[in-house]
Amino acid sequence: MSAVSVGPGLLAEPISLAEQSYRDIRDRLIMLDIHPGEPINDGQLALELGVGRTPVREALKRLEIDHLVISYPRRGTFATIVDITELADVSELRRSLEPLAARKAALSASDADRNALRDLARDIERLEDKKVDKRGLMQYDLSVHRLIYRAAGNPHLEETLIRLDNLATRIWCLVLDKVPTVSGHIEEHVDLLDAIVAGDSEAAEAMALAHITSFEQTIRAVL
């Protein structure tokens, strides 16, 4: 599985081989393609990604900072366990930072970002016709949040929120089969995206908070 990108060009940008390796491995960990607790074989990953071991090893160092892998002396590197008890801590931060990002995006997004956000909103409106499975819906969720973070125009906020959203998505994927429906959660993004595109910062801020609150409630209901 390659780095998550829903829709033509929505997240496309020139990146280095090392950065692409990082994103590919990161998204495998987020979507639980690499199972929690599973040992990481850098040689095998290099073969699968068609790169040398150096960019893979560099990626794993970054992923350890992201709390997605953990290394032990003489034992190797492993995917971290998904700790459900982290939900409260992650959600606490997201309730403060996600509305901030949505507000900033509404106020300062570039024309290119607004076009990408608009295109993604229209794409989500067609999800029922596409019959996207739960896994595919989670890829849409990741793309929405990453686009909003980028549009906010603050790289420090973007980096922090990506890490938090990655951890939240791992928890979501862990209980995905227990959740009755995911499509409603993804469709909530349409109004949020449209508010950002329209520059309605107050509505975007309020909807982002409601979305994060709804996410936490949904997860807790199936735990």
Image: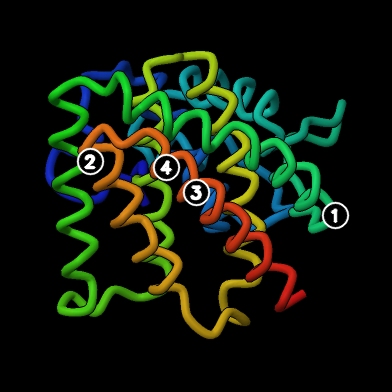
Residue holding disc 3: 28
Identity of the residue drawn at 37% across and 33% down: 201
From the top left corner, tell me how far across and down residue 93 is, in percent.
Answer: 70, 36
Residues under numbered marks 3 and 1 in contact, where contact means CB atoms less than 8 Å apart? no
Viewer-nearest of discs 3 and 2: 2
Which of the labelled discs sits on residue 117, or is there none? 2
Task: Tell whether 199 sits left or right of 165.
Answer: left
Identity of the residue drawn at 19% across and 32% down: 114
Q: Earlier in the sequence, mark 3 or mark 4?
A: 3
Identity of the residue drawn at 22% across and 53% down: 121
Q: State the SS at label 2.
A: helix
Q: Amino acid at mark 4?
A: His
From the top left corner, tell me how far across and down residue 64 is, in percent.
Answer: 69, 28
Residues under numbered marks 3 and 2 in contact, where contact means CB atoms less than 8 Å apart? no
Real-space Cα separation, disc 2 to disc 1, in angstroms: 32 Å
Which of the labelled discs sits on residue 85, or is there none? 1
Q: Nearer the viewer, residue 207 or 60?
A: 207
Q: State the SS at label 3.
A: helix
Q: Earlier in the sequence, mark 3 or mark 1?
A: 3
Q: Amino acid at mark 1?
A: Thr
From the top left corner, tell me how far across and down residue 34 is, in percent.
Answer: 58, 53
Residue holding disc 4: 145
Coloring basis for residues? rainbow
Real-space Cα separation, disc 3 to disc 2, in angstroms: 24 Å
